Image (spheres, rainbow, N blue to C red):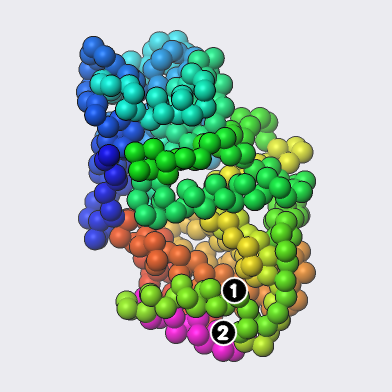
Amino acid sequence: MSPLSTAPAALTAGDRERRAAYLEEVLGVLYPDTRATARGGAGAVAAYALVPHARRPVLLVPLASRRIAAAAVRRYAEPGSTLARLKREAVVAALRTGADTVLLPDRLTVTGDPATTIDGYLRGALGTDLHLSVHLGPARANRKPVLQLLTPAGDTVAYAKLGTGPLTRALVRDEAAALTALSRAPLAGLRVPRVLHHGVWNGHEVLVQSALPVWLPRAPLAAGRLAAAMRELAHAGPVTAGPLGASAYWRELRGRLAPLAGTADGRALTDAAAALAARHADRTLRYGGWHGDWAPWNMASLADTLLVWDWERYRTGVPVGFDAVHHALQERVAATTDAAAALRRTLDRVDALLAPFDVPPPDREPTALLYLVDLAARYLADRQAEAGARLGVLGTWLLPVLVDRVAGR
């Protein structure tokens, strides 16, 4: 067994260096008792092209056939811009025609015992032949190997996640439980993956879920449609109401905050949360479900439904409307380098964001501020700053804004 290392104690390297190091760690997890080389050799169990290159690997593309390799790139992710789409299509064309040796010269071959690899485990678990494409995400405490599973015909049939440490193992278990619960919910406006397999391999938590058809034509996403889907999710389970100070939600949040008080950021957050709760203890809120990370990159809009994935943070019993604030904040933060300004602009729009959820006007800002406390508690508990996450250093953006708003400034 070769678990991923824990997060570094400080931000000492850029994303490029961290990705290259992470590649070695992931290979040790997926292919124990094997050897990875830049050249082919006898006994190869897998061969990959590194996209875009070995200096900053983002995707490992299987080279079993041109069709499989091209499909792996085409269905890896939806490009966020015209330039990104053109680059993707250039890579797909190169893989289809055999010109990829020029465009993607960096290769990797794994040799050794195929019975010990993740490929062998997944083939046995699903009872079918398949090939893996491996996504290497940016530095985050919750980063984990994510595998696209393709058939010999090049069809994407599933995605697999591996929980390799205490945090990510818990998140993979939580996502399996969330998808199982949601499979019984009467959801009409959104579609979630199905659990195909959940098990443990080499001490790692493994979740295989069906592939949502993200490659189908997209449809424009109207704000009302997004809010309706989020409202449907909030009401997919029990919805309760009661004073904040006596709620199960506040007891749970207070329990998560208590271990964080040993750091300066944790104390600032705990003090702000206590002041917020004291001021609104008697305020009656409604509590329902939320996705936990409903961001633009975790969904796709089709003509008849919204595809939504990454359910590892799904929870019930939280103030209704959290998803709307989160989505708006993540959308703004992704478009700027000034996260604090993005947060202030989001808070200035809470009336418009929370009105579709029937949150009364006096409850809207308290709801948004509770969301910020919840999010900050997650970031601190997960040690996102130490993992190198862009938004992990809360003192540069979230905490100053939160403290000012709680103080009425």
The structure residue drawn at horizontal position 57% and vertical position 77%, both measured from the top left corner, is 250
Can you give x and y, in whole percent of width and height, for residue 123 in the image?
46, 24
The structure residue drawn at horizontal position 53% and vertical position 56%, both measured from the top left corner, is 313
Q: Residues within 10 Å of mark 1 (few under 14, many from 20)?
A: some
The structure residue drawn at horizontal position 44% and vertical position 54%, both measured from the top left corner, is 170
Magenta region includes residue 227: no
Looking at marks 1 and 2 on the same chain, the residue that comes earlier in the sequence is marked by 1
Cα–Cα span, label 1 and label 2: 11 Å
The total of numbered circles placed on residues is 2
Q: Which residue is mark 1?
A: 249
Vertical side of 253 occupied by 224: above or below? above
Query: What's the mark number on residue 277?
Result: 2
Vertical side of 266 occupied by 205: above or below? above
Magenta region includes residue 274: yes
Q: Residues within 10 Å of mark 2 (few under 14, many from 20)?
A: some
Relative to 139, 212 lies left or right: right
Nearest the camera: 380 or 129? Answer: 129
Vertical side of 10 occupied by 269: above or below? below
Query: Which residue type does callout 1 highlight?
Result: Tyr
Label 2 element class: helix
Label 1 element class: helix
Q: Which residues are magenta?
A: 265-280
Does residue 378 appear in this view?
yes
Q: Quadrant of residue 204?
A: top left
For discs 1 and 2, the disc positioned in front in the rendered view: 1
